[in-house]
Image: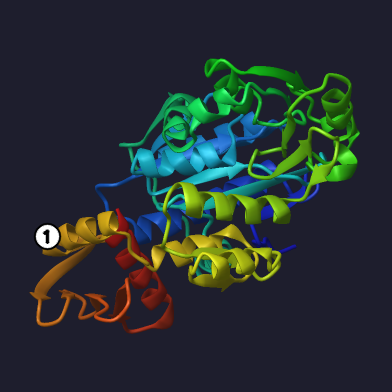
Amino acid sequence: MAIRFGTSGWRAVIADEFTNKNVRLVTEAICSYLKNSAEESKQTLIIGHDSRFMGEKFAKVASKISRDKGFRVLLCENPTPTPAISYAIRNEKAVGGINFTASHNPPEYQGIKFSTADGAPALPEVTKRIEEIIEYTPKVENKENGSIENFDARPNYLDDLKTKVRFDQIKQANGKYAYDALWGTGRGYLDKTLREEGLEVETLHDWRDVTFGGRSPEPSESHLDELREAVKTKNLTLGLATDGDADRFGIIDKNGEFITPNQLIAVLSDYLAESRGWTEGIARSVATSHLVDRVAENRNLTLYETPVGFKFIGELINEDRLTEEIARSLKEKLAHEPSKIGGRRIENINRMDGVKFIFADKSWLLLRPSGTEPLVRIYAESENIDDLEVLLEQGRRYLLG
């Protein structure tokens, strides 16, 4: 059966389709894609896994293959949340990340999430290219300059989290909390951070169980009975839960009521617009509640709608709807005169309107700040559609790298 990437990676049943053989095929294809699209000087690759069965074994298989292809592999030492891996990709200036997780799927599943250099899940044009490589393209030659280093993504991620969350105000509320890790990767992250800030936290299911208690590690209302009971019987302020790879959440209020993600996202959007003075707009998927639209209208913010999947919101961010800080950074970037982009030798640079890089193979790439909108447009021309997609991706990576 052909390997196909879905909304958030490739997932399959362990020992059925998800085998060492297929892991090798997918890893080889990802390495091939990266070698053809990333700059030669930037070859760090983050590899991690969640707490599912065989996660660490599959991660080691992928690490050895990636090392043999010349990558500097940072192999996560422990089960690691997807958001922490995404942050590590950006913080370590990696070309991407391979994360072995099936998220909230049942325990018999495993999966691979591939994220690009921006830390976001790979877009459909990227995963389509990887699927094509699996079927038709020869393997990448082995190289001797690769390496594998053990890596702990937690310290830097938690340090960054503390710059974004106002724990001093949370402490002033004098609340008591419960956290249900659902046997997933959030254990040792959310609870650790709250305790380090002096908050009282009771944890549930904070050990590894590859069966996730015999059900999907999904923080839905029907899976949080024990968390609800803890909140109600111990008079706690709030119950928090995360899914298998800690990129989904569930909330129980002090009355034992489940707060839906759609409700919370609307509340958070309103709070952040007011408390942080954010004015850049709000993005939601087509499947998200229109409560968010009402917040945007009330706050006079632009509302963006995307297909389902965070990768599309990530792409919206990558379209450079600019903050002043990003605008300054891009202005500096466009002033540079690189000799290569994505391994392509630059033959000429034209600054008539924006920056146009003309390559030795006669393809070209134009990065042009819009005169009417807060974004940078990327234009390109190449001899075939597949290479054009690669060239556009190289342009985005250069601009945001």
Which residue matches tag 1?
Answer: 336
The number of callouts visible is 1
Q: Which residue is nearer to you in this view: 143 or 219? A: 219
Can residue 355 be seen here? The reply is yes
Closer to the camera, 153 or 25?
153
**At which x and y percent is residue 126?**
50, 65
Nearer to the camera, 90 or 239: 239
Give the amino acid type for the residue marked by disc 1 in the picture: His
Quarter-of-image position of residue 339: bottom left
Residue 86 position (above or below residue 292): above
Percent x, y for residue 268?
A: 59, 50
In the image, taking residue 226 as reference, residue 177 lies left or right, namely left
Residue 150 is drawn in which quadrant?
top left
Question: Dot 1: few (<14), some (14–19), or many (≥20) neighbours within 10 Å?
Answer: few
Tell whether 374 sits left or right of 166. Answer: left
Q: Nearer the viewer, residue 387 or 301?
A: 301
Q: In the image, is residue 306 above or below residue 262?
A: below
Query: In this rendering, would 8 be left or right of 339?
Result: right
Query: What residue is at 65 percent from the left and 38 percent from the top?
Result: 246
Relative height, residue 244 to residue 116 (above, below) = above
Q: Does 74 appear above or below 234?
A: below
Q: Is residue 367 visible?
A: no
- Give percent across and percent down for residue 63: 50, 36
Name the image quarter holding the N terminus: bottom right
What kind of element bears circle 1? loop
Q: At x 53% / y 71%, what residue is drawn?
A: 304
